[in-house]
Amino acid sequence: MLGSTAFPSSSPLSQRREPARELAPADTFARRHIGSDATETAAMLGALGLDSLEALIDKTVPADIRLPGPLALPEGQGEHATLAELRALAARNRVFRSYIGMGYYDTITPPVIQRNILENPGWYTAYTPYQAEISQGRLEALLNYQTMVTELTRLDIANASLLDEGTAAAEAMAMSFALRKNKEAATFFVSQQCHPQTIDVVTTRAEPLGIRVVVGDETAWDFDAATGADAPFGLLLQYPGTDGRVVDYTALIAKAHEHRALVTVAADLLALTLLKPPGEQGADIAVGTTQRFGVPLGYGGPHAAYFATRDAMKRQMPGRLVGVSRDADGRPAYRLALQTREQHIRRDKATSNICTAQVLLAVIASMYAVYHGPDGLRQIAERVNLYASVLAAGLRRLGWKVSDAPFFDTVRVDLGEISASEIVRLARARQVNLRVLDERTITLSVDETTDDLDDLFAIFNGGNDAGFDLAELAGTLPPPVAGDPLRRTSDYLTHPVFHRHHTETEMLRYLRRLEAKDLSLTTSMIPLGSCTMKLNATSEMLPITWPEFSKLHPFAPLDQAQGYAEMFRQLEGWLAEITGFSAVSLQPNAGSAGEYAGLLAIRAYHASRGETRRNVCLIPQSAHGTNPASAVMAGFKVVPIRCNEAGDIDVADLKARAQQYADTLGLLMITYPSTHGVFEASVREICQTVHAHGGQVYMDGANMNAQVGLTSPGFIGADVCHLNLHKTFCIPHGGGGPGVGPIGVASHLVPFLPSHRVLAADGDAAQAHHAVASAPWGSASILLISWVYIRLMGGEALREATALAILHANYIAHRLGQAYPVLYKGSEGYVAHECILDLRDFKTETGVEVEDVAKRLIDYGFHAPTMSWPVAGTLMIEPTESESKDEIDRFCDAMLLIRAEMEAIGKGELDREDNPLKNAPHTALNLVAEPWPHAYPREQAVFPAPWTKEAKFWPSVRRIDNVYGDRHLVCSCVGMEAYGEEEA
């Protein structure tokens, strides 16, 4: 036996053992996640004149908000053990064949797309494409997406995606309300044929805006009788309807327009390959989901919603919009267009705040269309429709009454005297899920994955096989009727991009070409302030494509999702412990949606106490930029609070405002540490002041990465906080989405957390009135990522990660502080987890602006930090704990070399206009230009640092002309003639 083997006394194995350490797994995770080891940590601390991380924390985090003990979380464990534990949870989910429909369908993700986009860190670790020159791949994919949506809907312009169908419908309502011609009209009519989850989200969003939602039969609506506030400013229709029927809405839309109402149609994109599109019926807006275009069900998400409208309304359209402009060489280049709608910039004047894109999912959907092309999509749709038609024919042969209304993929069955529960019992026995519309009606929705109907026929044949031959049944069906007014006659997806990549070879090369145009975390550090671009570990990402998680329908019976339920319970508990709150809701599927849900909880709490007058929201100038927009959407009046010269909240001004609005104070929204990058010592006093005047404290969790394990919102005194799981808890940014924004609340706010109408029991129906997402647990499948992260790390390692994030930020502030003034510091002279460099004075000295530095960093192989926010002319840097000291030093070296270039401009050694900063970034084409057009050498342009010669990231375009792009707005794939001639 091994234990009895004698070893020479000189062998290491003869030394005293440490069983606990030696028996621990070798694949522990914290050392893989945290970028700096003990030696590097000591070196950085030494540079700061400190001897330990605890000494740094003592100088940065106020003593009165420090947690008294460690987090009560499970101890961290190895990657293999964690995935095995999650496998056990996955086994508790039962994936039945789903015929539920309701806008969610099983789909086939082409393997070339799954492996090279969904599972590829080159795509999922990239940031939102605000730096367009290093985001050309994603932007091209999103332009394909917008083109796909506009051509299938036959509307003029589409955005780059929204959160889900319910959210998109709510955005359409808000946009219609803002554009209403009859200013007295305050009613939004929603067809009873809309999906119930959409009605739920729309109803939630309407109430704070003073909109009355009427749900009913659109064919019976009397437009003439509705006057004043009862007059409809907009209609929402479902196409096909939730029970499957397809109706031509042309006449109804024309009648709505006569009464000055705008019409939104929630349409199934796959159905639009065969059916008359909304734009041809006169619709003003079309919304829906692209989930069935290759995006797994994932128990509800994440999924990209689409939003399309007419050209005349493009400036009121919510969300991001990709457009075509030109670069410094006059070559076409992509960028985000009309960016003045961004909520960070417009604050309380923003079009919307819950308009986050789902970029990674939109890219998948667009590539599904690129891969299949128009003929392939039509073939899939025709096959789905044929299966539905065969199903209807077989059910009729069995004697069942099937709706005679035209349908695409959903068959409505009248059960007569038979109970729906009896049919459901037979279905469960065959591991099949159906949708019960009511006790005497069932609907059956088929999809791309449907390959037989035998079980369905057996279920409706008393449990006995019907013995139908599908081909024989199909042969009994009449051919499509020529000239059918419901059939589509217009072309779609005519651009060459939808025709060139139908082989896997061509598709693989196309995806790789686009990926190579984008800078992601696979390339280098992305030091964005307030965005926390940290490691998205492979072990965290693996489970999202496990079929036990990815193929579950969001409205499957709860007893089939027990693995998910246990994962939710554990994650909610861990997040509650981390935040110091009583409960957590996982439903909000973006940080912005989390903000909104938290504000609704506060609003409902005041209402429950008879204090609806409390509608004032105090927001410091240092708060996160999304806060004012969310507050307005939730029905609050925004009152700003000043900050002092140190960047802290002006406590005297806060107290004066709290006293001034004592009778109407609803809440304070605060970001902590502040967006200025400091832990404010007065935060407890601030919270107490608001509470003393009857208000609640909402804490924005954007900077939670500086709190975990050291302090918490609940311990500080906040009442509610949303978390950005795509920041602190490792869900990747995906090029601008997905994200998740759970909210934690104190005990008195627990009754006001989001609920969901679809899963509410009869007794809970009264409470099911404020869902903020289409699915009950939002983007459920990517919650797995955060579960794995916390399970791997444990409380001790999470605290260490927080401390290292603070150390890295202070090390950068120390290294760069002599070259670039650090704008704000705490009372001890240290920053939190991010720092702001002030570049404003350099414009006068050298003509160099902050944008020039941002673009020059591309030549050094880095993404720029957050630019000109929260203070114009600054760079906000957040290194995160995942970066190594070597990478941080490279970034600092790049910034110092850029500072030297600026000094050369100031001394006249480089021309004030023709210099590497003003002309950055430089491309490979720029390098080989003859004659070389610049006074500085080529090598300085493209190889400005030693490491760029070893591994060079080449941007595919030079600096993009934003003004030209907005003046010549092109937002879909069109021929070059649309770009017009170059201006002189």
Image: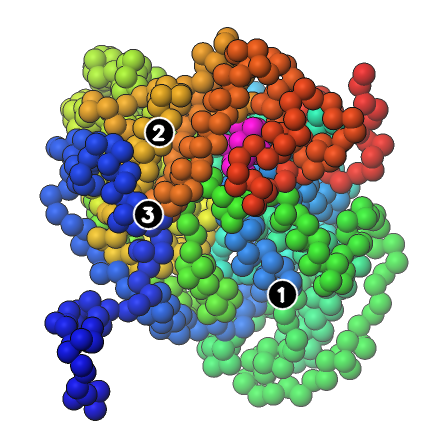
Magenta-tinted stretch: 854-864
Vertical relation: 959 (above or below) 756: above
> Mark 1 or 2, which is nearer the eye?
2
Q: What residue do we see at 73% from left, 67% from top?
A: 383
- Residue 173 on image: x %, y %: 55, 35
How far, Cα to Cα, is label 1 from label 2? Answer: 46 Å
Q: Give the label on residue 111, or none.
A: 1
Quadrant for the C terminus in the image: top right
- Residue 327 on image: x %, y %: 70, 28
Query: Mark 2 or mark 3, which has the lower sequence index?
Result: 3
Quick check: 777 left or right of 367? left
Tell me which amino acid carries mark 2.
Arg
Tell me which amino acid carries mark 1.
Pro
Kindly identify which residue carries mark 3: 36
- Residue 250 on image: x %, y %: 75, 42
Q: Residues within 10 Å of mark 1 (few under 14, many from 20)?
A: few
